[in-house]
Amino acid sequence: MKIISANFIYTPEGFVENQAVAFTDTISQIGSLETLQASYPEAKHIQTEPNSILFPGFINTHVHLEFSSNKTSLKYGSFMPWLYSVIEHREDLVGECDNSVMMGECEAMMRSGITTFGAISSFGNELEVCENTPQRVVFFNELIGSNAQYADMLYGDFMERVKASMSCKPSSRITPAIAIHSPYSVHPIILQKAVNVAKEHKLPLSAHFLESQAEREWLEHGEGELKSFFKKYFSTETPVTNIQEFMYAFDTYPTHFTHCVQANQVELDYLAQKGHSIAHCPRSNRYLGCGRLPIENLKLPFTVATDGLSSNDSLNIFDELRAALLLHNDIPIQELAINLLKTVTSDAADVLGLNCGKIEAERAADFAIVTLREAPKRHEEIALWSILHTKEVSALYIEGEQYV
Ligand code: MCF
Ligand code: FE
């Protein structure tokens, strides 16, 4: 047993002052240091630095590790030029992205306090790194392929990757999962088969959805910039599905939809009604010119996530939260800061179905410690100061063991 004490603890009831947490690999009890030391006289006491706040480890629900070597290869500013640049540079980028590059990014995520992430994997290349990092990883095997002719082969390859991720050792903290790339890139027949696999094995399910204006125009009218893209690369001029058909395919299974920036109110209400959630990637949306997700009107749970280095400049969750504060400039900043912290802790854990993300008895002992340079003068501003002043956490624990 260990006991960690901090000036503030971020609990489901808000920030509590001068309390401590007793833990092994899970949280045993929260209380005053004196009470916990009386209950567990043998426990090692960890005193955090002055002005520290104990948070549950942060959760980044959506990242593409295999694009970690991108710095200046992909074209930012607008979605379609970005997509063409992915086609041009994908092979080189994925080739350059070896295990040490990806492990470097897992470590960077840990330094920013991320103890759990959702890895979207198109080739399965990052499985070894995800098994070796101490972080909890929801390993989203991505299904892609819109051409019916090749669909069976692509589905077969996808199922091989799903099986590989299912046979990881429990100590690797991998949860196998499924990602449908998007409505424009996945044929409805294999889409339905993959959704059925998720249902059958109760696997977390995710999909990129309504990210760009070009996607919307293509799915609604078979027109726009994706038309020439599909003509050039796939010799087709008709979309394989439409917005409604794609959404309905997930009707009975709560799914984590990424982006949804171009979804209208009717579609957002439908997703809410079916119990789905959204991964909101503010920097990715801005860098690819996709627009702003109106989080102030959402009636469904959402997480804040970094996306990959294919559409970002870092996988640091605090960089992402600061971007969210600036992007959503009409929402009162203190209120927004409080909500944003919830999206990367308890809400993210609920979405991924994991027993972490909350400082509460019986939850996993995953912690991130944020240390401010001076004492917060007003209790109600701790969330904002934490986001604004943190580049890296001062310590990080996963299942009770310290890694930063
Ligand atoms: O989320 C961003 C933007 N939207 C779609 N896809 C990706 C993103 N970052 C990487 N990707 C990957 C995707 O997983 O790009 C590949 C897919 O494997 C090519 S198709 C856009
Ligand atoms: Fe993505």
Image (spheres, rainbow, N blue to C red):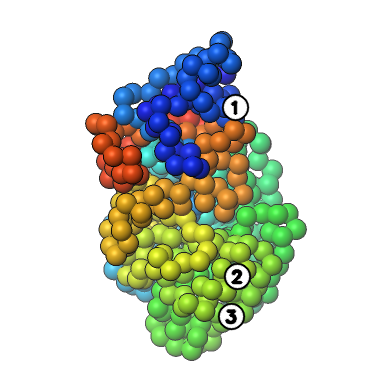
Mark closest to the chain's N terminus, 3 or 2 = 3
- Find out if the beta carbon at label 2 lies less than 8 Å from the nearest ligand 2 atom: no
For the C terminus, which image quadrant?
top left
Report the residue at 35% width, 71% height from top: 291
Give the image location of residue 268, x and y in percent. 51, 72
Q: Amino acid at mark 1?
A: Ser
Q: Is residue 228 visible?
A: no
Report the residue at 50% width, 70% height from top: 209
Mark closest to the chain's N terminus, 3 or 1 = 1
Distance in Å between CA atoms under marks 3 and 1: 46 Å
Seen in the image, is 232 located left or right of residue 163? left
Residue indicated by mark 3: 244
Q: Amino acid at mark 3?
A: Gln
- Find out if the beta carbon at label 1 lies less than 8 Å from the nearest ligand 2 atom: no
The residue tagged with tag 3: helix, strand or loop? helix
Give the image location of residue 257, x and y in percent. 53, 64
Q: Amino acid at mark 2?
A: Gln
Within 10 Å of disc 3 (Cα), the crowding (few <14, some 14-19, many 20+) is few
Mark closest to the chain's N terminus, 2 or 1 = 1
Q: Which mark is residue 28?
A: 1
Please determine whether, in this image, residue 107 is positioned above or below residue 400.
Answer: below
Residue indicated by mark 2: 273
Res. 127 image quadrant: top right
Within 10 Å of disc 1 (Cα), the crowding (few <14, some 14-19, many 20+) is some
Report the residue at 31% width, 24% height from top: 50
Res. 381 image quadrant: top left
Q: Select label 3 or label 2 by which is in front.
A: 2
